[in-house]
Image: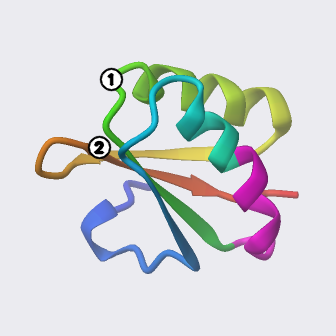
Amino acid sequence: MTIDLNTIQAAKVVDARAMSCPGPLLEAKKSIAAVKVGEVLEIWSGDANTKNDMPRWCEKVGHEFLGALPGEGYERLFILRKK
């Protein structure tokens, strides 16, 4: 099943555009607790490395990285909380 990221309603959006690596990842780690299992956390990141780091972190801790969409000068990354 393919998920249309444009239609996702995130339970929480974290703006980490001004942070360099590992700031956006640390914000995701802190913020995932604010969403319920089955809900989506959206991270905005201006750091190009975040797009590579976030899927690895999600796999490591048991969440699902749904993908990323380009914003204007940043990426919108979507994480589904699984546990």
Instruction: Provide residue 26's location: percent of width, then percent of height.
Output: 68, 38
Q: Is residue 21 magenta?
A: no
Based on the displayed image, in which of its 4 quarters is residue 55 positioned?
top right
Q: Is residue 13 left or right of residue 79?
A: left
Return the residue nearer the eye: 15 or 81: 15
Residue behind mark 1: 48
Q: Residues within 10 Å of mark 1 (few under 14, many from 20)?
A: few
Q: Which mark is residue 65?
A: none
At a point 31% along the width and 37% down the height, the residue shown is: 46
Q: Which mark is residue 75?
A: 2
Magenta: main secondary structure equals helix
At a point 64% along the width and 23% down the height, the residue shown is: 56
Q: Amino acid at mark 2?
A: Glu
Q: Is residue 37 left or right of residue 4?
A: right
Instruction: Provide residue 15's location: percent of width, then percent of height.
Output: 44, 59
Are dots 1 and 2 in contact, CB under 8 Å? Answer: yes
Measured in 3D between alpha carbons, the distance from the residue under mark 1 to the one under mark 2, in whole angstroms, is 8 Å
Element type at mark 2: strand
At a point 37% along the width and 43% down the height, the residue shown is: 18
Based on the displayed image, in which of its 4 quarters is residue 34 positioned?
bottom right
Return the residue nearer the eye: 46 or 36: 46
Instruction: Provide residue 72's location: percent of width, then percent of height.
Output: 11, 50
Q: Which segment did they paint magenta?
A: 29-38
Element type at mark 1: loop
Q: Amino acid at mark 1?
A: Ala
Q: Is residue 7 left or right of residue 36?
A: left
Instruction: Provide residue 51's location: percent of width, then percent of height.
Output: 41, 29
At a point 38% along the width and 60% down the height, the residue shown is: 3
- Please report whichever mark, 1 or 2, sits nearer to the chain's N-terminal start: 1
Q: Residues within 10 Å of mark 2 (few under 14, many from 20)?
A: many
Question: Residue furthest toward the left?
Answer: 72
Question: Residue furthest toward the front?
Answer: 18
